[in-house]
Amino acid sequence: VQLQASGGGLVQAGGSRRLSCAASTIVSDGVVGWFRLTPGTQRMLVAQITGGGNTHYGDFVKGRFAISRDNAKNTVYLQMNDLKPEDTAVYLCNVWVGGRTYWGQGTLVTVSS
């Protein structure tokens, strides 16, 4: 399974951004997650969605982000609203399917104050 993350870029504080994680094959039963990585910190879970559509978010999200999936397109989205400078990070997606975990490359989101 190959994952392609996209949608990063520069955004002003208070703005929005939608990230996409496209899988090379069907992963409708898989658990897909978005993580983020900043210099000097460990990889942190942002949001996760199961094959059945159940979602889980990191505490810092506080209702600002929403994860969703379009199984017809093998794509998971992360809608990020009310972005803050501390949300600046490389965002990565992964999928757990068939007993294995696959990672995509990251996409950089920079939030300016």
Image: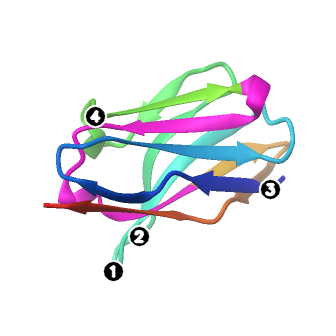
Is label 1 in contact with label 3 (beta carbons under 8 Å)?
A: no
Q: Name the residue rendered at 63%, 46% in the picture.
A: 21
Label 1 close to label 4 by CB (< 8 Å): no
The label on residue 2 is 3
Measured Cα–Cα span from mark 1 to mark 3: 27 Å
Disc 3 packing (10 Å; few <14; some 14–19; many ≥20):
some
Task: Indicate which disc, 1 or 4, sits on the residue closer to the N terminus.
Answer: 1
The residue beneath circle 2 is 42
Span colored in magenta: 71-92
Q: Earlier in the sequence, mark 4 or mark 3?
A: 3
Q: Residue at x 75, y 31 (%)?
A: 73
Distance (Cα) linking label 2 and label 4: 21 Å
67 left or right of 96 in image: left
SS under mark 4 = loop
Query: Circle 1 is placed at which residue position?
Result: 40
Q: Does the rendering let one see residue 78?
A: yes
Instruction: Tell whether 21 sits left or right of 88.
Output: right
In this rendering, the answer to whether 87 lies above or below 49 is below
Whole-angstrom CA distance, mark 1 to mark 4, is 24 Å
Q: Position of residue 75 (x, y in %)?
A: 68, 36
Spatial CA distance of label 1 from label 2 is 7 Å
For discs 2 and 4, the disc positioned in front in the rendered view: 4
Residue 99 x/y as whole percent: 82, 46
**What amino acid type should be assigned to the residue bearing mark 2?**
Gln
Mark nearer the viewer, 1 or 3: 3
Mark positioned earlier in the residue sequence (2 or 4)? 2
Q: Secondary structure at mark 2?
A: loop
Determine whether the residue tagged by mark 3 lies in a helix, strand or loop: loop
Pick whichever, 65 or 56, lies toward us: 65
Disc 4 marks which amino acid?
Arg
Residue under the point 21% across and 54% down:
12
Residue depth check, mark 2 versus mark 3: number of the one nearer the observer: 3
